[in-house]
Image (spheres, helix red, strand yellow):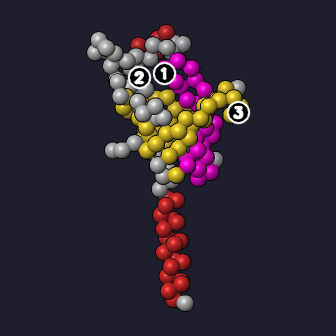
Amino acid sequence: MKRHSLIVLIAVLFSLSASAQLSLTKTWLNQEKDGKVKVFLGTDGKYHGQIIWLKEPNEKNGTPKLDKENPDHEKRKRPVLNLQILHGLEKKSEAEYINGKIYDPKNGKTYDCKMTIIDAKHVNLRGYVLGMPFLGRTSSWTLAED
């Protein structure tokens, strides 16, 4: 009986330890594997994300890649590296974050988004339009190696 109790206790502790690692506040490699986004909890209690690494941070002439597709002409001069692209995600459950916005510097568009933690090393980001998740696409991100 004691052995059975010990096995159950170990299983519970392992389960708690695994669930504690399910966190969105990490650095994620995008699906294309050409950028890393660091997700953090802001002072507003919502989750945000910033590009902290690009596979190709510079143009062919050596100058930094700029946010040249931004609809705001003044913002077209900002570097893509260190750009905050994820805004305002709210924690709905341990694995689901909703009501966010994601900016895509490749096309200058902002989409509604939500993120779902799949496991400790994988999340899905769903970008969509008109507030309707079925009008969008899902991108799978993986935990970035430090």
The residue where tag 2 is placed is 80
Query: Horizontal and vertical percent for residue 116?
Result: 58, 44
Q: Residue at x 47, y 45 (%)?
A: 25
* Type of amino acid at the residue the image marks with label 3: Phe
Mark nearest the camera among 3 and 1 is 3
Q: Residues within 10 Å of mark 1 (few under 14, many from 20)?
A: some
- The answer to whether residue 90 is seen in the rendering is no
The residue where tag 1 is placed is 105
Do the residues bearing badges 2 and 1 touch, measured as CB atoms within 8 Å? yes
* Type of amino acid at the residue the image marks with label 2: Val
Image quarter in which the N terminus is found: bottom right
Residue numbers of the magenta segment: 93-118
Which secondary structure lies at badge 3? Answer: strand
Q: Residue at x 38, y 26 (%)?
A: 81
- The answer to whether residue 103 is seen in the rendering is yes
Closer to the chain start, of discs 3 and 2, is 2
Q: Nearer the viewer, residue 26 or 8?
A: 8
The residue where tag 3 is placed is 134
Q: Residue at x 62, y 51 (%)?
A: 93
Closer to the chain start, of discs 3 and 1, is 1
Which secondary structure lies at badge 1? Answer: loop
